[in-house]
Amino acid sequence: MAIYDPKSLKADEFINHEEILETLQYAEENKNNVELIDAILEKARPRWENGILHCKGLTHREASVLLACDIPEKVEAMYKLAEDIKLQFYGNRIVIFAPLYLSNYCINGCLYCPYHAKNKTIPRKKLTQEEVRAEVIALQDMGHKRLAIEAGEHPTENPIEYILECINTIYSIKHKNGAIRRVNVNIAATTVENYKKLHDAGIGTYILFQETYHRKGYEELHPTGPKSDYAYHTEAMDRAMEGGIDDVGLGVLFGLDKYRYEFAGLLMHAEHLEAVHGVGPHTISVPRVKPADDIDPTEFDNSLTDEMFEKIIACIRIAVPYTGMIISTRESEEVRKKALAMGISQISGGSRTSVGGYTEEERPHDTEQFDVSDQRTLDEVIGWLIELGYIPSFCTACYREGRTGDRFMSLCKSGQIQNCCHPNALMTLGEYLTDYASADTKEKGMKLIEKELMNIPKEKVREIARENLKEIYNSNRRDFRF
């Protein structure tokens, strides 16, 4: 029997089945223990000490108690705390990105994904470099600056050389005032050597969803293909960090296995990264199983209500306060609105989950990886965020200034976000409003910028940001950053 050890590099030891079962039992036994729940909430509360913002977060056991608790006033206290933590560390900024699907060729047999090798109904497609260029220009013309590239796992159709060539193409395209400034990568688990190549290509975050941490369930859901190797997949983030990538993104596909098990496993993975590498995940994503070609989510008996989904988001935010949290267009406008208040800091906008979808006038469905619930345009999403009082941010400054990994976390923990990320967000919003926004969105956005400039604590920073915004509005100068 494997022994639980967060510092181990073996999957069955840092994601330990027996430890998760004991955690779930402990949570069930203490879900009505008001004294313990109050102590956990108090531990997680952010505090300023000597000019530094401290937030201890929670262990997977402590967070699992909160998730199990169903006392209404305590659940409300969790939601309030999650919102407070999010505002302390990320303010009212919401980072914007879009997925770019390069290829749906795949040799895996994943039961929940329409790209699985046995699916003969989905058209297979792989973008040429000219098609990548066309997709990127379409995304730039929408206003995007940050992409997450996606591809199925296929040794001949999608080798690492193809992924690297696509990254190079994406970064090379400067169209009008547009440019993609950060390329995050969501591709299959690979070798340290290949992670070094991705690092050298200048990627932002390497993202890999675990799908499920339950080994038996994982092996049943991945019957064939290289992804069926649970240990190799689960240990991928350690290889990525060994390859020099210090921004990594975790995620599970909620609805495949029991959500409390996945929740505990996800936080154990975050604890493992912190214990071994000194820095936890840069992001955590919370996708849910959705309908897709040849996939019926009702086949999975672990579906999640919206209410429990929101509670999971809040508990993750409380447990890992410094980590960015992502929600995609899988979710509806209503769910995304609630999730923003619970701790989400990044959302996609105007997304198309098909290969080559951005150059099509009508949204294509034949090569989609999953149904898109929020089908609004990017401009509609930006206008909506502004109306809700959020600052849509296209900022990529930390990545390009070398503030990644523990350096970003230090900035976050020191409370300097308001003097750095806040003005950067306003300047990138100014770019969007000047170059791409509809008249209505532009009017609302300009008012928001004027209001939010006053929330920059340092007067010198505030004045520089104001002058830079004037340059953005009145010239073609772009990409100012602190």
Image (spheres, helix red, strand yellow):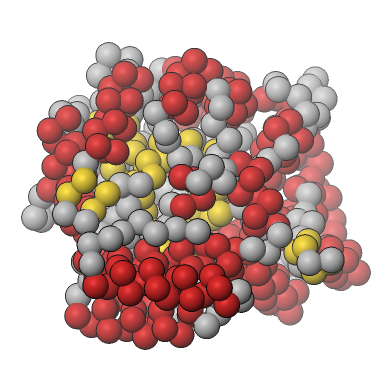
Q: Write down the quadrant of residue 473 in the picture.
A: bottom left
Quadrant occupied by the N terminus: top right
Please provide percent x and percent y for residue 279. 68, 40
Q: Nearer the viewer, residue 230 or 383?
A: 383
Q: Residue at x 50, y 46 (%)?
A: 401
- Of all residues shown, which one is farthest toward the right? 35
Q: Write down the quadrant of residue 43 in the picture.
A: bottom right
Residue 154 in view, yes or no: no
Q: Is residue 89 above or below residue 353?
A: below
Q: Is residue 397 left or right of residue 85?
A: left
Q: Is residue 176 above or below residue 252?
A: below
**Count of numbered labels shown in the rendering:** 0
Q: Nearer the viewer, residue 177 or 364?
A: 177
Q: Is residue 416 left or right of residue 393?
A: right
Please provide percent x and percent y for residue 207. 48, 38
Q: Residue at x 51, y 75 (%)?
A: 462
Q: Is residue 424 left or right of residue 260?
A: left
Q: Is residue 174 left or right of residue 253?
A: left
Please provide percent x and percent y for residue 118. 28, 24
Q: Nearer the viewer, residue 174 or 319?
A: 174
Q: Residue at x 39, y 59 (%)?
A: 480
Q: Nearer the viewer, residue 135 or 455?
A: 455
Q: Write down the quadrant of residue 112 in the picture.
A: top left
- Of all residues shown, which one is farthest toward the left? 361
Q: Is residue 66 above or below residue 25?
A: below
Please provide percent x and percent y for residue 130. 12, 33
Residue 20 in view, yes or no: yes
